[in-house]
Image: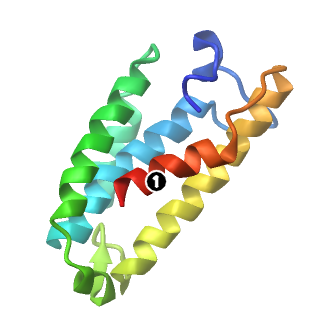
Amino acid sequence: MIEAFPEDKVFTYSIGGMRPFSGMVMEFLGMAVPGVNGIATGAWKSVPELWHHQKNEIPKTKQLIDRWDEATAVIGKLWAKTSFGRFMETDQAFGEWAGPVYSFLLYWIDNEIHHRGQAYVYLRSLGIEPPTFWTLAESYVKLI
C-alpha cells in the first residue's frame, strides 16, 4: 500500500479530516513489533512509550517502506519464538488491555484492515488503482 502512494501524497493527503496514510502506517509500526514482542515474551511497552514512537519518529520520505520491511523481519523472528499455547493465555497488552493473547492479535489485524480500507479510498480518490486485496493477504501468509 505504501508503494502505491505518490511520495508527496502519503504524508499530506487526507479526506474528511482523516489522517494521512503515513500516520496510519506509523500506528501500525508503533504497535507491530512491540505487540508481537509482548505476545512472544509477555514484556509489554507502556502506552506512553508507543505514542512517543508514533509522534516523534515519522520519516519524511518513503523510508516508511524500509521501516515496514525492518519491522516485518523482526516480527518473523519473534513469531517463530511464540508457542501456540501462549495465544490462549491471559495477559495485559501495553499495561492497559487485559484479555486472551489471541484477542490482541485479532484486534491489530482488524485495525490494520480498517486503515488499509481508508488507504484504498485515498488511492481511488487520487485516480490510483489500489493493490489487490489478495496480494496484501499473501504477506500475512508468509509470516505464518
Where is residue 3? Give x, y as percent: 55, 23
Describe residue 34's horizontal placement relative to residue 118 as left or right: left
Where is residue 5? Give x, y as percent: 63, 21
Describe residue 85's horizontal placement relative to residue 134 as left or right: left
Q: Quadrant of the N terminus?
A: top right
Residue 111 picture quarter: bottom right
> Viewer-proximal residue, 43 or 101?
101
Describe residue 13's horizontal placement relative to residue 92 as left or right: right
- Three-letter code for the amino acid on which mark 1 is drawn: Tyr
Relative to 94, residue 118 above or below: above
> Viewer-proximal residue, 119 or 130?
130
Describe residue 130's horizontal placement relative to residue 110 as left or right: right
Relative to 3, residue 118 above or below: below
Q: Secondary structure at mark 1?
A: helix
Query: Which residue is located at x 73 percent, y 29 percent?
Result: 14
Q: Quadrant of the C terminus?
A: bottom left
Residue 127 picture quarter: top right
Q: Could one spot residue 45 in this view of the protein? A: no
Where is residue 48? Give x, y as percent: 31, 53
Query: Which residue is located at x 44 percent, y 15 percent?
Result: 60
